[in-house]
Amino acid sequence: MQLVAVALITTPLLFLGVVLFLRARGTMPEATTSILTPISGALGLSALVTGVVFSRLLAAGGRSPAVLLRLIIVQLAITEGAALFACVAHLIEGEAASAVVAVVLVGWMAVMQFPTGARMERWQGGRGEDAL
């Protein structure tokens, strides 16, 4: 499971690296609008809230390891999607705020959503909503 989590976490980082490289080379045209950056912030915030809501909903479904694995994959995938959108927003618009949103979301995934043995034990111990 940790290998899947690492893949989901590193994908936005690698894409952000490509985006920053393209932006640094100056090959991208300047944006005429900056609507995607605020959308990326709102999408990032909604991804974090959705992750909390899913953890509460799935916690009611049982304490099995399979439920925890589903929960982790769903949370990471939602957050990864928001981080990738922020990368695309930075690619198109070049706003630093969208790159910051991507980095914050990846940091959240790495710190708060990464599957560990302690989280598995807390989950099976009955405190499912607090495990993630």
Image: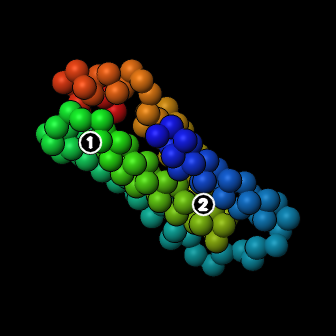
23 in relation to 60, above or below: below
Number of residue marks: 2
Depth check: give the residue in front, 113 or 5: 5
Q: Kindly identify the amino acid type of the residue bearing the numbered disc 2.
A: Cys
In three-dimensional space, the C-alpha distance between marks 1 and 2, rounded to whole angstroms, equals 30 Å
Say which residue label 1 marks.
67
Q: As drawn, is 109 to the left or to the right of 98? A: left
Name the secondary structure under disc 1.
Answer: helix
Please name the residue shown 60% across and 60% down the image.
87
Name the secondary structure under disc 2.
Answer: helix
Q: As drawn, is 22 to the left or to the right of 64? A: right
Please name the residue shown 46% across and 35% down the image.
114
Residue neighbourhood size for the residue with mark 1, other residues' Cα within 10 Å, grouped as few (<14), some (14–19), many (≥20): some
Can I make out residue 17 in this image? yes
Q: Kindly identify the amino acid type of the residue bearing the numbered disc 1.
A: Val
Lower position in the chain sequence, tag 1 or tag 2: 1
126 in relation to 92, above or below: above
Q: Position of residue 16 (x, y in %)?
A: 67, 56
Quarter of the C terminus within the rendering = top left
Please name the residue shown 40% across and 55% down the image.
78
Identify the image's colour scheme: rainbow, by chain, secondary structure or one colour: rainbow
Say which residue label 2 marks.
87
